[in-house]
């Protein structure tokens, strides 16, 4: 328990969030292809180096979720990435799900079978927290009760196994943004999903004070017409969380889920300026919304390394400000933030 308590203390810090840098080899290839770079062990290492060694990342980021491959790769200075993070007081974490599998036209998450053994290996590599992602697709007949219950049960089993091995589990139920659904539909689905997740966690006897929730925001579908504005997204998201998430949960760290970097920052900021008391630490655990500008600035070229690192740090800073309600839209146009 002491171990879990310490990890929560190190991850849940005012003004800081968690970086998701755990793209699988397949997803990393997609991201690199978007800037015309071939995905190889070395280009993926270079890209991780860019992000993880960005100057003063530790001012805004308390923990980083890594992909297994990255555990064994080294920075340009020859330091294993988990060790590099440890040296700058950033907690290394690990994605432990093995991706998705189909079940009756919907998706479940793989990787429970040998999870305990893998956690022991990941512990030796220096990681202290984990992530497991379940996805829910909104359409006329989905998500089904079958998928909602199955994903909730698997998330709870994963969380329990993590605790048995001294890992803080990030529980990630992602209601996907794809589709033309309204924000109300997203609210109803998110509420049902979160209720099922916390019921399952309770049934497994998981101690809520040692987990972190990584939810999607309550938001209109990406293809919806008349998408809800920032105010509505923030209000409905907070309302949904208050209706479903126990107060003893220490931290909620949102995923960005296909929002633009600016949207993800504005929504998070708004939640902190509604004038509502939030019983949990409310922050970010973005992948794309933190990394996209850096990826675009880098283009795989050494000479762009510094500019790309600055683009990443800028986004990290803006999101850090959003976690305390101090972000303003005008900052997007200012060269120097703060
Ligand atoms: P995005 O912020 O890009 O949605 O990624 C978060 C994540 O970790 C998905 O599992």
Image (tube, grey):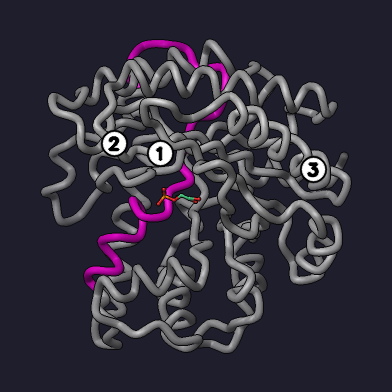
Q: Position of residue 110 (x, y in %)?
A: 66, 53
Beta carbon at label 1 within 8 Å of ligand 1: no
Earlier-in-chain disc, 2 versus 3? 3
The residue tagged 2 is: 179
> Is residue 5 something one can see in this rendering?
no
Q: Secondary structure at mark 3?
A: helix
Question: For residue 126: magenta?
Answer: no
The residue tagged 1 is: 176
Outermost residue to the front: 104
Q: Position of residue 44 (x, y in %)?
A: 45, 79
Above or below, comparing residue 23 to residue 190 in the picture: below
Q: Quadrant of residue 188?
A: top left
Give the residue at x 30% y 82%.
37
Give the residue at x 33% y 51%.
289
Local crowd at mark 2 within 10 Å, few (<14), some, or many (≥20)?
some
Earlier-in-chain disc, 1 versus 3? 3
The residue tagged 3 is: 4
Question: For residue 279: magenta?
Answer: yes
Q: Position of residue 189 (x, y in %)?
A: 46, 22
> Start and end of the magenta stretch?
272-297
Quarter of the picture holding the N terminus: top right
Local crowd at mark 1 within 10 Å, few (<14), some, or many (≥20)?
some
Local crowd at mark 3 within 10 Å, few (<14), some, or many (≥20)?
many
Q: Position of residue 209 (x, y in %)?
A: 74, 28
Q: Are marks 1 and 2 in contact (CB under 8 Å)?
A: yes
Cα gap from disc 2 to disc 3, whole angstroms: 38 Å
Q: Foreground mark, 1 or 2?
A: 2
Which is more toward the observer, 88 or 319? 319
Which is more toward the observer, 106 or 13? 106
> Is residue 254 something one can see in this rendering?
yes
């Amino acid at each position: 328990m002491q171990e879990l308590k310490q990890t929560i203390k190190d991850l849940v810090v005012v003004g800081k969030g968690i970086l998701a840098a755990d793209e699988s080899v397949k997803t990393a290839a997609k991201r690199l292809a978007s800037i015309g770079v071939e995905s190889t062990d070395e280009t993926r290492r270079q890209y991780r180096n860019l992000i993880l060694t960005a100057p003063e990342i530790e001012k805004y980021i308390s923990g980083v979720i890594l992909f297994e491959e990255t555990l064994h790769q080294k920075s340009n200075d020859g330091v294993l990435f988990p060790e590099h993070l440890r040296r700058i007081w950033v907690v290394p974490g690990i994605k432990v799900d093995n991706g998705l599998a189909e079940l009756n036209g919907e998706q479940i998450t793989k990787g429970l079978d040998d999870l305990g053994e893998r956690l022991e290996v990941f512990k030796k590599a220096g990681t202290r927290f984990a992530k497991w992602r379940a996805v829910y697709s909104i359409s006329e007949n989905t998500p089904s009760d079958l998928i909602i219950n199955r994903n909730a049960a698997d998330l709870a089993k994963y969380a329990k196994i993590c605790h048995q091995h001294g890992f803080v589990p990030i529980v990630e139920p992602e209601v996907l943004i794809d589709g033309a659904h309204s924000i109300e539909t997203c609210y109803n689905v998110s509420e049902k999903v979160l209720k099922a997740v916390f019921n399952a966690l309770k049934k497994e006897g998981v101690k809520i004070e040692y987990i972190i929730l990584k939810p999607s925001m309550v938001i209109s579908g990406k293809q919806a017409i008349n998408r809800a504005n920032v105010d509505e997204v923030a209000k409905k998201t907070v309302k949904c969380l208050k209706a479903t998430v126990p107060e003893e949960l220490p931290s909620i760290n949102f995923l960005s889920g296909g929002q633009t970097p600016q949207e993800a920052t504005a929504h998070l900021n708004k939640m902190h300026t509604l004038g509502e008391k939030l019983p949990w630490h409310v922050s970010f655990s973005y992948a794309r919304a933190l990394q996209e500008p850096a990826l675009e600035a880098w283009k795989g070229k050494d000479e762009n390394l510094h500019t790309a690192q600055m683009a990443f740090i800028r986004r990290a800073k803006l999101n850090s400000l959003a976690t305390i309600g101090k972000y303003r839209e005008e900052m997007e146009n200012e060269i120097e933030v703060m």
